[in-house]
């Protein structure tokens, strides 16, 4: 039996988390969800997902702060992060973000799955 790749979905919008979770489940991914960056960091103390899907605009700890903390941690920085956001690339906060794959909102299921496969090399079905 194949091991299901795991994805940590970080988005403050419950509807978006639900839609993304459902999309990925259909493709064989095991999904863990967090409502903000701080909750995601707590999950990362317990699990090591194959990739992280990250919204940028969230309360408590936004995606920009999450990325700063995430990439400072030696063991975590190897986990690929895919940013799912509508934040313009002209926003000054992007200057602080390490090179990450970005999937602009709104996105399609095919775009989302292709980004995950490109980042982690898993092809779940």
Image (cartoon, rainbow, N blue to C red):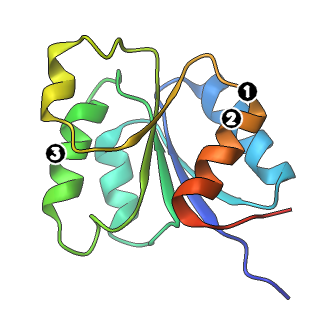
Q: Which mark is residue 68?
A: 3
Q: Residue furthest bottom?
A: 1
**Any part of residue 61 in sight:** no
Which type of secondary structure does the marked residue at label 2 adopt? helix
Query: In the displayed structure, would residue 58 be above or below residue 116?
Result: above
Q: Quadrant of residue 36?
A: top left
Residue that badge 2 annotates: 111
Mark before the other along the chain sequence, 2 or 3: 3
Query: In the displayed structure, would residue 120 be above or below residue 19?
Result: below
Which type of secondary structure does the marked residue at label 1 adopt? loop
Q: Position of residue 95 (x, y in %)?
A: 14, 28
Query: In the displayed structure, would residue 76 be above or below residue 85?
Result: below
Quick check: marks 2 and 1 in contact, CB under 8 Å? Answer: yes
Residue that badge 1 annotates: 108
Q: Position of residue 102 (x, y in %)?
A: 45, 33
Say left or right for 71 vs 113.
Answer: left
Q: Residue at x 13, y 59 (%)?
A: 72
Query: In the displayed structure, would residue 110 be above or below residue 28?
Result: above
Q: Quadrant of residue 67?
A: top left
Say left or right for 93 vs 43.
Answer: left
């Amino acid at each position: 039996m194949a091991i299901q790749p795991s994805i940590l979905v970080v988005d403050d919008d419950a509807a978006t988390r639900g839609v993304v979770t459902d999309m990925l489940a259909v493709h064989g991914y095991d999904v863990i969800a967090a409502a903000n960056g701080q909750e995601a960091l707590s999950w990362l103390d317990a699990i090591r997902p194959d990739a992280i899907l990250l919204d940028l605009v969230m309360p408590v700890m936004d995606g920009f702060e999450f990325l700063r903390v995430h990439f400072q941690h030696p063991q975590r920085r190897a986990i690929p992060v895919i940013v799912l956001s509508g934040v313009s690339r002209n926003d000054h906060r992007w200057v602080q973000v390490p090179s990450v794959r970005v999937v602009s909102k709104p996105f399609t299921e095919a775009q989302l799955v292709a980004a995950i496969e490109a980042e982690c090399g898993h092809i779940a079905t």
